[in-house]
Amino acid sequence: MTAPQSTQPYDVIVIGAGFGGMYALHRLRKLGYRVRVLEAADGVGGTWYWNRYPGARCDVESLEYSYSFDNDLQQEWEWPERFSAQPDIEKYANHVADRYDLRKDIQFNTRVQSAEFDQELASWSIRAVDGDTFTAQHLALAVGNLSLPRVPNFPGLDQFNGRWFHTGQWPKETIDFSGRTVGVIGTGSSGIQLIPIVAQQAKQLYVFQRTANYSVPSMNRLLTPEVALPHKAQYPAWRERAKDTPFGIAGHAPPEKFAADDGFEERQRLFETKWKTGGNISFLYAYKDLLTDQAANDLACEFVHDKIRATVKDPKVAEWLVPNDHPIGTKRLCLDTNYYETYNRDNVRLVNVRQAPIEAITPDGLRTTDEHYHLDDLIFATGYDAMTGAILDMDIRVKGGARLAEAWEHGPKTYLGVMVNGFPNLAIITGPGSPGVKSNMISAIEQHVDWIADLVEHMSRTGKATFQAQAEAQEQWVKHVNEVADQTLYPKANSWYVGANIPGKPRVFMPYVAGLDKYRKICDEVTRDGYRGVSIN
């Protein structure tokens, strides 16, 4: 652990050493600013440090889910697979940290407890759980959108005699499930990736599902030189094309046709081609109205429903696995390898806990309203307090003034997803109100960090001490984010996009879904207009 330098004031304190925090450190340090990154873990990687569960894998293709700021970096790094697994992404994060000597300015094993802004000093005071304190003019939150794991409040968990895990806090050591009876609660993205792997080891696997989710095959494969080298030869052009796409991904051309433009047979052929190509963006790019027109979406849903029924041999299990409560793509469309096929195994049983809810965890298993299941191990694949959880887990406030938790009591309000009225010099990387989680996260991270760095540079050049969102601009942005969402099918799903998985959390649609390309243009226009909507003093 690097020794703290509590007495030295910094220009910027960054919280989090994932891809957002690492790039913020590199970019700001290169501009000459004194930067310190505070990280709760003992290593870099953020979500790819914590999510070590079996089968953890990115759903954006490796050649695009990577930094673009240094061509030498993207030319030298070799990705082994089309969709990289967690260990390879963590290796990449460590390579970046080593290549740019980032660790000397990162303090690991340091969880932030609170941050307070002093208006008179125009400075943040940050306190860690262990008592270390830091001061800085600017505070940048790179805490991630999916980084505060949620364990449901089932009675009896503290009495469970077996091993239990959460996918978002998986231990570093290899966990062997051979010969054991295992229960997995949750069939979102983490569960869908993990379940086929655990099923291959366990003597018996029970999957406790409340809500079925859509998943499409990844068609993952080794990334051969025949694929990688031509891509690398055109890397700068690929990156420029990605900037003009909604998801920040250049590998799939945006669709030009509406679903109704094709007849049934032609539409089925296209869906089949997309299915066999693999990838969630590929499938959602079948037609341009899949996420805006219910009739078009229904056609895609019906295709996937038929795929599930054709794959899963037990008709009752197949019907339980058919999603019926949300349009496809309005929750994060999952990516899998042999997920539905896993339910044909003799050692796997799907338990419908919507029909028979979980009552309690018992010392030797789990009890629903109609049966008790003996378990040696229990895995929670139950997700996160998304987008705001890790931010509000810290006590962020202005001295003698507002607390962020109070300002966001009825849901998060930001300007551009980057700043908050009433909280000077607070910058959020891929925060609520930005397209972060609805895009290639690294593309969004680079855009955010570059924009924030330019703002800090502007303040430095002009001798200004503080920035914050103007109240009216923030209200207009929140209104715009909601208007854009209301033109789509996204609000029809009870997803973590609206905080539906957290009891008592305000139901607010948090991502900006007009696209990273449109968002980028808006941010550029704000800059050209002299930082319209931002008070700089």
Image (tube, rainbow, N blue to C red):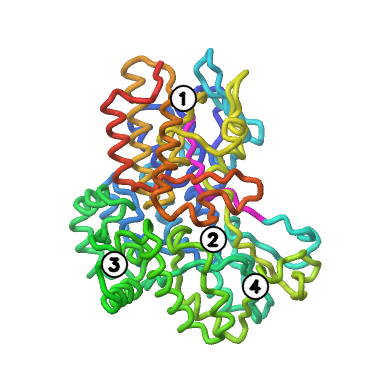
Q: As shown in the figure, which amino acid type bears the numbered disc 3?
A: Ala
> How far, Cα to Cα, is label 1 from label 4?
47 Å
> How far, Cα to Cα, is label 2 from label 1?
41 Å
The residue stretch that appears in magenta: 139-151
Q: Which residue has dot 2 on it?
A: 52
Can you tell which quarter of the image residue 529 is in?
top left
- Spot occupied by residue 305 in the image (x, y as percentages of width and height): 46, 75
2 or 1: tag closer to the N-terminus = 2
Q: Which residue has dot 3 on it?
A: 260
Residue appearing at x 74%, y 75% in the figure: 373
Q: As shown in the figure, which amino acid type bears the numbered disc 4?
A: Asn
3 or 2: tag closer to the N-terminus = 2
Residues 284 and 527: in front is 284
Q: Which residue has dot 1 on it?
A: 471
In this rendering, the label closer to the viewer, 3 or 2:
3
Q: Quick one: SS at disc 2?
A: loop
